[in-house]
Image (cartoon, rainbow, N blue to C red):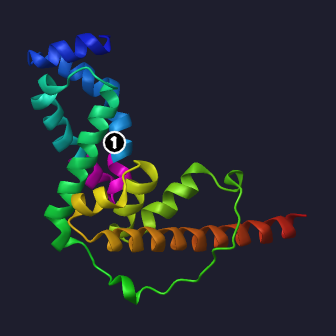
Amino acid sequence: MLDEKEIIEGCCRHDRKAQKALYEKYASILLGVCIRYSGRRDEAEDILQDGLIKVYFNIKDFAGKGSFINWMKKIMVNTAITHYHRNLKHHYHQDIDDIREMDIEGSVFDTADFTREELFAIIKELPHGYRMVFNLYAVEGYKHKEIADLLKIDVNTSKSQYSRARSLIRKKLNSLKKIAEKVDEQAG
């Protein structure tokens, strides 16, 4: 298997072997990024494919400063955002003011209370706009101003959607915790 430097150099020459090696080495990691931003696996695979094409055509622009995987992840995030804008009219929209949420700010959760899959499933259930803002802010580390620019929304909308996403996540985690406690009581 080719190392990272050989993959980059080979892809710059449009070498199919290097492109295949890049795919085999990084596709699963990059698909994970795409899945965070899409509602369905097939949609994430489309984003991955579009993003990899961008990687292949722009790899000559990778300056070698910083991490190659982080450079590719940024391309995937930007591709997911572009995909979101392009397909916005096809998504079911729910006005954020119509969503009723319980304020459970006082809830405290131990991360060990939930599996990674449970947390991922909860995030995946968020309305599409909430999920985009939550992932960009909480996972990728973007600031609300950057998110607003990327998604072409107001900064306050970004902050509001993030806050509401957190509230929905807390509500769902609280429900999961109560279910687990009932199961424990019945078992004990």
Residue 167 x, y percent position in the rendering: 54, 73
Residue ID for mark 1: 31
Residue 70 x, y percent position in the rendering: 34, 33
Asked if residue 18 is positioned above or below residue 145 in the image, the reply reads above
Asked if residue 103 is positioned above or below residue 158 in the image, the reply reads below
Is 87 left or right of 14, judged from the image as shown?
Answer: right
At x 74%, y 65%, the residue is 180
At x 46%, y 54%, the residue is 138
Q: Is residue 41 magenta?
A: yes
Q: Is residue 153 magenta?
A: no
Asked if residue 91 is positioned above or below residue 99 in the image, the reply reads above
Is 174 left or right of 80, judged from the image as shown?
Answer: right
| Displayed quadrant of residue 39 | bottom left
Residue range (magenta): 34-46
- The kind of residue tagged 1 is Leu
Residue 152 x, y percent position in the rendering: 20, 66
Element class at badge 1: helix
What secondary structure is the stretch in magenta mostly built from? helix
* Mark 1 neighbour density, 10 Å: few (under 14) some (14–19) many (20 or more): many
Which corner quadrant holds the C terminus? Answer: bottom right
